[in-house]
Amino acid sequence: MTDLTRLTATEIAGLVASGETSAVEVTRAHLARIAAVDDRVNAFLHVDTEGALAAAGAVDARRAAGEELGPLAGVPVAVKDVLTTKGVPTTVGSKILEGWRPPYDSTIVQRLRAAGTVMLGKTNMDEFAMGSSTEYSAYGATHNPWDLDRIPGGSGGGSSAALAAYEAPLAIGSDTGGSIRQPAAVTGTVGAKPTYGGTSRYGLVAFSSSLDTPGPCARTVLDAALLHAVIGGHDPRDSTSIPAPVPDVVAAAKLGASGDLTGVKLGVVTEFSGDGGEPGVQAAFREAVETLTKMGAEIVEVSCPHFRYALPAYYLIAPSECSSNLARFDGVRFGLRVGDDGNRSLEEVMSLTREAGFGPEVKRRIMIGTYALSSGYYDAYYGQAQKVRTLITRDFTSAFEQVDALISPTTPFVAFPIGSRTSDPYQMYLADLYTIPTNLYGGPGISVPCGLSEGLPVGLQIMAPTMADDRMYRVAAALESAVGTLTPPAL
Ligand code: GLN
C-alpha cells in the first residue's frame, strides 16, 4: 500500500477528490507518523488530533454529498505557532503565552479551513520568531531530520522539519528576516516569503510589523504555490494588506516545470558570491547557475552595494519594532501572570511576569530596540537604519531594471550542530545574511533545494520585484525539475 505520508499535497488532493482515499485516512497516516517520529524531531508543540480528524471527516462528508472540493481539500497542514488558532493553544514558542487559547482564528488559518485543508497542529519556533535555529524555543529545540544533532533552521524550524520528516506535506511559516527561507534551505524543502502585504498579518503575533510576512512551506514548488494561492490575497483586517489579486503563482510553477527558461534574465548578486559562504554552499550554487543557464536563462552579475548594510539595519529596525509590539505582554491580558498575590503593585507583577516569561534572546532584542528608539539615540540608530532601508530598496529597484529576478544561495552555511552558535548572537544572525535584504525591500523570495554539501541540503534563493511572486515560482520550478526533491535518511 502507498505510504500516504510520502505523497505531495497535489497527489493527496487528487486521491481524496477521486475517492481513492479519504481525508480521514490521510490524516490518520500523518498523525501516526507524528506519533512515530516527533519525540525525536520535536517539530510540534501541539497536535490537534480531534480537530484534525473532525476537519478531515467534514471534507469526506462534503465529497460524499457531491460538493466541489478545492485544490487542497483533505490535505494536512502544520501551522507555525505564531498564528492564532481559535481554541487551540498558541504560544509563539514563549512561556509568556503558555496556556493561551486564542478566541479567534488568524486570517491565514481561516483560509486554510475554508479551503478544506486539515490542520494537524502547531509547530515549534524560536520564541517570538527571533532566531535562526529553533533553539530559542521555550519548549526545547527542534531537530533536523537530515541529522538529528543539527538545527532545522529558524525561526520556523518546526514547520520545515515537519515537512522533511514526512509529518505533514504542507506547512505555514512566517518570514521577518528569513524564517521561512532559511529553514527551508537547511531541511531540503521549499519555502516562500510572499510580497509584504500579499498575505495577511491578522492574527499573526507581531514581531516586527513592517517586515512580518506569513507564507507557504512544502516539499515541492507546485505544492507551495497552491498553498500560497489559498492563503494569499487582500484582507481588510490588515491595514498593510495589498488590495490586488495574488499573482498567478500556480500557473507560473506549472510553466517552470517544463524546465525552459528561455528569455528569463537572472542576476547573481555580486556582493553575495563568495561573501563568507561555505565552499560547499558556493559550489552547489555555482552548479545550479549552470543548470539554469542550460535551461535558457541569461545570467548576469548585478551589484547591490548596500546589501552589506542590511544585517545591521535589520538588527535595529526589527528589535525597535519588537520592543514596541511586545509591550502588550504585561501579565494582565494574555497567558502567564507571576507574583499576583494581592500585595504587589501592578508594575511589580508586570516585571516579574516578563522576567519569568521572556527568554534571553527576546530580552536582548527588547533592550536593543528600546535603546535604539530612545530620545537622543533615535536619529543615530533607528533613523539611520531606515535610511539604509531606502538605499537597499533602491538597489533592488535598479537591479530589476536590468534583470527579471535575483539569485543567491539562501544561507551562507548548511545546518549547523545544535549548540554551536547559541553563545554568540552575531554568529546566529549571520544565518540570514542573504535573506534579510528582501525583507527590508518588501519583495518576495523563495528557497528551493539546489543540491547537497557534505550530505546536507543547500538552498537557492530567488528574489523578485514586489507583486511579481509568480516569477520566482517559475524559476524555482525549473530548477526543481532538474535537481528533483531531496530525500533525507530514513528516521
Ligand atoms: N533570524 C532572524 C531573526 O532572528 C529572522 C527571524 C524571522 O524571520 N522571524 O530575527
Image: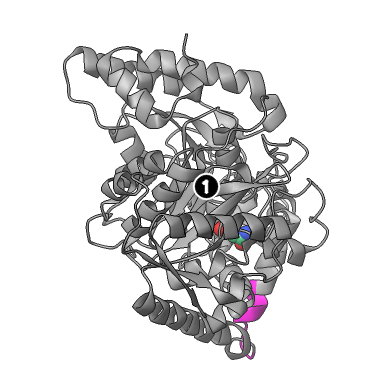
Quadrant position of ligand 1: bottom right
| Residue at 52% over, 58% down | 290
Left or right: where does residue 340 sit relative to residue 52? right
The secondary structure type at the circle numbered 1 is: loop
Horizontally, residue 156 falls left or right of residue 223, namely right
Residue at mark 1: 82
- Magenta residues span 369-376
Look at the picture and state if 293 lies above or below 203. Answer: below
Taken as a whole, is the magenta stretch helix, strand or loop?
Answer: helix
Q: Position of residue 352 (x, y in %)?
A: 73, 55
* Residue 437 drawn at (x, y percent): 52, 71
**Which residue is depicted at the point 58% across and 49% down?**
185
Quadrant assignment, res 410:
bottom right
Crowdedness near tag 1: few (<14), some (14–19) or many (≥20) residues, C-alpha within 10 Å: many
Image x and y of residue 436, in percent: 55, 67
| Depth order, front residue of 61/293 | 293
Which image quarter is the C terminus in? top right
Residue 360 belongs to magenta span: no
Q: Nearer the viewer, residue 188 or 165?
A: 188
Q: Nearer the viewer, residue 7 or 237?
A: 7
Measuring from the top left, give residue 140's x and y in whole percent: 73, 39
Residue 141 lies left or right of residue 10; in this view the side is right
Badge 1 amino acid: Val
**Where 201 falls versus 89 (above or below)?**
below
* Vertical position of residue 143 compared to residue 436: above or below: above
